[in-house]
Amino acid sequence: MTSELAQLCARLDLWSGRANRITEVLLFVIGFGMAMLTGVQVFSRYVLNHSLFWSEEVGRICLVWISFLGASAAYRRRAHIGVDFLVVRLPHYTQHLVAILVLLLSLVFFVVLIAYGTLFAFFVVGQKTAALGLPLIFPYLVVPLSGGLFCLHALSHLCRLLQQPGGGK
């Protein structure tokens, strides 16, 4: 059983790492594109005296995607702020159990994010954005996508915690 768990954990960690690398590359591309778009918009508005009517809409969509994907990448790296001033005072075994409980509760939230994000994305499927007329599903698809990434990273972390019986270091 432990070798099967170890193999599962290794596969989960591999897929979590690969997904995070792809996410971070995508974050770079979107962030760079957003910076370039902002520069072109400023040049167009103040030098050419002609504003790009679609730049704010694209910038807003990019910002939403960066926020959700960036949150999942930060979760994988454990870069989110945590409040643990009470937990660190608990015995090591209890800290381990609390960490598992927090991950399980987080997984519930991530599944809700996937479910309701998908429902909402398909609720707006027939609508279009104001400036470019893009299907409105595009900006909202990042919600269930990031929820899936969160789940993958949380399952990988949970698997690692479960491999440490008793919260061993």
Image (cartoon, rainbow, N blue to C red):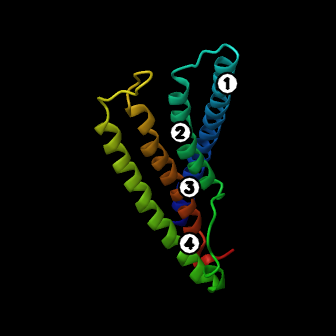
Where on the picture, by quarter, is residue 49? top right
Q: Could you say whether the residue bearing mark 3 is in a helix, strand or loop?
A: helix
Quadrant where the C terminus is found in the figure = bottom right
Residues at marks 2 and 4 touching, judged by CB atoms closer than 8 Å: no
Between 43 and 36, the one lying in front of the other is 43
Query: Can you tell which of label 4 and label 1 is closer to the viewer?
Result: 1
User: What is the CA distance from the residue labelled 3 to the residue labelled 4?
Assistant: 22 Å
In this rendered view, identify the residue nearer to me: 131 or 36: 131
| Cα–Cα span, label 2 and label 4 | 28 Å
Work out how far the residue at label 2 is from the one at label 3, CA to CA, in angstroms: 33 Å
Residue at disc 1, secondary structure: helix
Mark 2 vs 3: CB contact within 8 A: no
Judging by the rendered image, the residue that carries numbered circle 4 is: 99
Q: Which residue is disc 2 drawn over? A: 65
Report which residue position mark 3 lands on.
7
Given residues 154 and 34, the one toward you in this image is: 34
- Left or right relative to 86: residue 119: left
The residue lying at 53 percent from left, 77 percent from top is 97
Comes first in the chain, label 2 or label 4: 2
Amino acid beneath label 2: Trp
- Nearest-to-viewer mark from 2 and 4: 2
Q: Which residue is mark 1?
A: 42
Left or right, residue 20 beside residue 150: right
Amino acid type at circle 4 is: Ala
Assess disc 3: are there few (<14), some (14-19) or many (≥20) residues with their C-alpha within 10 Å of its C-alpha. few
- Verify CB contact (< 8 Å) between mark 2 and mark 1: no
Q: Identify which residue is drawn at 51% across, 66% down.
A: 103
- Whole-percent x, y for residue 85 in the image: 65, 79
Q: Is residue 15 above or below residue 139?
A: below
Give the Cα separation between the discs numbered 2 and 1.
22 Å
Look at the numbered disc 4 and give the secondary structure of its residue: helix
Distance between the alpha carbons at the discs numbered 1 and 3? 52 Å
